[in-house]
Amino acid sequence: MKVLIGGYTKKTSKGIYELPITSAANDARLGKAENIISVGGPTYFRKDGNLIFTVNNAGDKGGISVFQLSDQGANEVDHYLTPGSSPAYVGINRTKKLIYTANYHTAVLSVFRYNDSGKLDLVDTVTHKAETLGPRPEQVDGPHPHFFDETPAGNLVSCDLGNDTVDFYRLENDQLKHIAQYKCETGFGTRHIVFSKDGNYFYVVGELSSQINVVKFNEDTWDFENIATYKTIPADFTDHNGAAALYISQDGKYVYTSNRGHNSIAVFKVNDDHTLSLVQRVSTFGDFPRDFNWDKDQRYVVVANQNTDNATLYTRNAGTGSLTPIQKEISVPEGTRVLFTK
């Protein structure tokens, strides 16, 4: 088992790094980070077999690149680059061989199809408009979609930080059709979303408000019911914070989000009525944790701290949801994305 970490390449990072896990159980340790893919600004990426689909900031152009991994190294097999900024998020459907990207700066959502070799074909794009822009400085300049991926029923969903919205789409005949919208509170700064195991609720995190909103919804009628909202940081924390990554455990019992500023991972228990109860806020032992992730058994969690060039390894208690740090100060530059692999 290994961990891949990528992020910005503004200082010393060269792209995506691989860190081996050198032992197991509570004595697990991450080994030295080794650069395996050289690419500009791989702030988010996905993997399908030996293919890596990554954000690529290529100077005055941005987009995604596809790399094929082998024993000889990594070889770029395709890319799709356009003038301007690169996307912020990459989603994937490995069965349908579809890639979804959300571009925070250009407000463009894109769908790509790929083949077994990793060759890309653009299927369709839509551009979000400035319809319900929030009042915060990060919102007034326009729409900012930060997430684009699938719903439990196979539709598509985007989180727009600028508009404070969750937008739902359907891909029909290779065309994206907008089918519904949920409006978060003004200034929420909608960023990422996860769904309950039964598909009847979603949990959406607000980057700008440092909140998680619990919503009941029906993916047939597109009815929405606002259930409750919870702070991801302590009530007395007054410094700047931006909530970031959001994950839900496989059993649907725990929700996790990272806090950039408070520099913590907040752990919530999902109650029987889908409301949330705080379990813990555990330090990330570094500054500005954007992404974190877990192995397929959800026994280990790794968080990357972007500003302090380090990562932290935790064990996860499946019964309580709590995280226990077992290794700190793991050196890795400018990390914003974490992905476990075999």
Image (cartoon, rainbow, N blue to C red):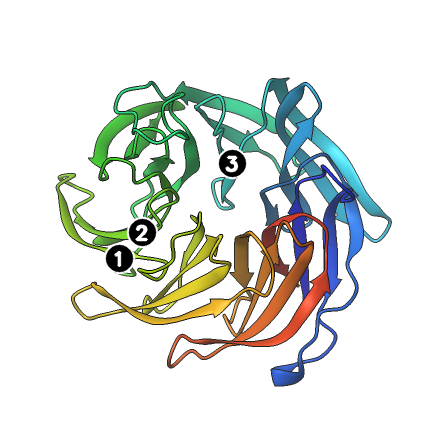
Give percent across and percent down for residue 331.
74, 60
- Check disc 2: other Cα within 10 Å, few if <14, some if 14-19, many if 20+: many
Give the residue at mark 3: 99
Give the residue at mark 1: 230
Image side of residue 102 versus residue 286, left or right: left
Residue type of the residue flagged with mark 2: Gln
Residue type of the residue flagged with mark 3: Ile
- Residue 75: mark in rendering: none
Name the quarter where the C terminus is drawn.
bottom right
Give percent across and percent down for residue 241.
44, 49
Query: Element at badge 3?
Result: strand
Question: Reading the chain from its start, which is encountered first: label 3 or label 1?
Answer: 3
Residue type of the residue flagged with mark 1: Tyr
Tell me: residue 327, above or below residue 204.
below
- Check disc 1: other Cα within 10 Å, few if <14, some if 14-19, many if 20+: some
**334 and 175: which is toward the camera:** 334
Question: Reading the chain from its start, which is encountered first: label 2 or label 3?
Answer: 3
Tell me: residue 44, above or below residue 164.
below
Question: Reading the chain from its start, which is encountered first: label 1 or label 2?
Answer: 2
Mark in front: 2 vs 3: 2
Give the residue at mark 2: 211
- Residue at position x 77%, y 59% from top? 33
**327 and 198: which is toward the camera:** 327
Give percent across and percent down for residue 129.
34, 18
- Residue at position x 56%, y 66% from top? 295
Label 2 to label 3, Cα distance in Å?
A: 28 Å
Q: Are marks 1 and 2 in contact (CB under 8 Å)?
A: yes
Image side of residue 58 versus residue 176, left or right: right
